Image: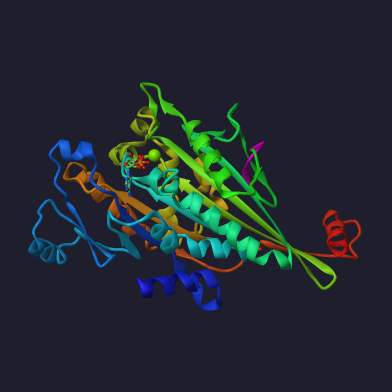
Amino acid sequence: IGGKLKAVGEIGAGNAEAMGSRILVFVRLRPMSRKEKEDGSKSCVKIVNKKDVYLTELASENDYLRLKRVRGRHFCFDASFPDSTMQAEVYSTSTADLVEGVLQGRNGTVFCYGATGAGKTYTMLGTMENPGVMVLAIKDLFLKVRQRSHDGSHSIQLSYLEVYNETVRDLLSPGRPLLVREDKQKGNVAAGLTQYRAYSTDEVMKLLQQGNQNRTTEPTRVNETSSRSHAILQVVVEYRYMDGASVVTRVGKLSLIDLAGSERALATDQRSQRSLEGANINRSLLALSSCINALVEGKQHVPYRNSKLTQLLKDSLGGSCNTVMIANISPSNLSFGETQNTLHWADRAKEIKTKAVTAGNEEIFKASDSDNEQAKLVLELQKE
Ligand code: ADP
Ligand code: MG
């Protein structure tokens, strides 16, 4: 992992050498559930050296060695987390450097991808006792901001939204669906979305748990959140500081995304467009795959407009954004097909190139520019 962390560091540093970095892809295996054990599951996944993932329905050590030579059954990621991995390690290996980048004004995005029940929500939100990436990232942000508070002022704003059936909803203030609008400065935004100003980690965990309760549930299974709902937490960090007579505003956005279950999109992937519509499959997830394919192939046109999810993530995917993918998998041989699909998808995602440079997120306003709204801030800050 030592070598890996260095690679993340290079991206985080955003220096010239980091140009053309690719997105980082991690795999997390969850423990076998009680239900899977009762159903007589056997483990079909083995993780070696926190990197290699072997997928097999066989179980002896020799089989794993043999599989290394079989294409499609051996995968290698930036890091692979065995089922004993703690939340803190997943956070520090996958996301901590992105948080540092956001403070420098670079957008960062973390996706959890995988079938329903594979551990996406556990990884992202977690529980009170074992908080996940969303909560640990915000905790880390608070800590880092406090350490730097002497040289400027920071504000941290959260919004938490859901994309379900191509409808965008505010999870912090449920109500009518929101429209996605294009904003010249902020990119595509959900109009009227609650921007919650956050001050402490405890309050954030409660807020997110409440938000998750507001996620759409399947009509037939009211206690479970729908496997077709994507939850997006956006954390916007604004940092203002004086540079001589100018006030510099630096904005970084961190998007943490608990994607819908990948099983249906994959199951219907090969059907015709017509039957895709008929089956009302997850358009946003398919659109995300198309955007990833376009980014992998270095195409000029990336079809962000095809779904609500990709519209919202336009400035948070590829390009100048630091992107991390966490693929969640179950160890059970009963989920073999889904696990294989997830690993293939993750393997493909490794090829996306990103440019780690600060992209127009910094604006400098001169104090003399008296017409400018922002210039007033200079004067305010100078008074402080
Ligand atoms: P998903 O969001 O992908 O549908 P969940 O995160 O809800 O899946 O996980 C399914 C179940 O497995 C939950 O009960 C969750 O608490 C448990 N689980 C998932 N990952 C882990 C893990 N790494 N350690 C312990 N329990 C886990
Ligand atoms: Mg979930």
Stretch in magenta: 188-193
In the image, 204: left or right of 335?
right
Foreground of the two, 188 or 64: 64
Tell me which image quadrant ligand 2 sits in. top left
Q: Residue at x 37, y 75 (%)?
A: 3
Q: Position of residue 353 (x, y in %)?
A: 45, 65
Residue at image position (35%, 65%) is 78
Q: Quadrant of the N terminus?
A: bottom left
- Is residue 320 something one can see in this rendering? no
Asked where in the image residue 66 lies, by quadrant, the reply is bottom left
Name above or below for residue 326 compared with residue 202. Answer: below
Residue 119, compared with residue 23, is above or below; it is: above
Q: Nearer the viewer, residue 21 or 272?
A: 21
- Residue 87 magenta-drawn? no
Q: Position of residue 264 (x, y in %)?
A: 32, 37
Query: Which residue corresponds to the image point at 51% horizontal and 73% vertical from the top-left?
Result: 19
The image's colouring method is: rainbow
Residue found at the very far bottom of the displayed protein: 17
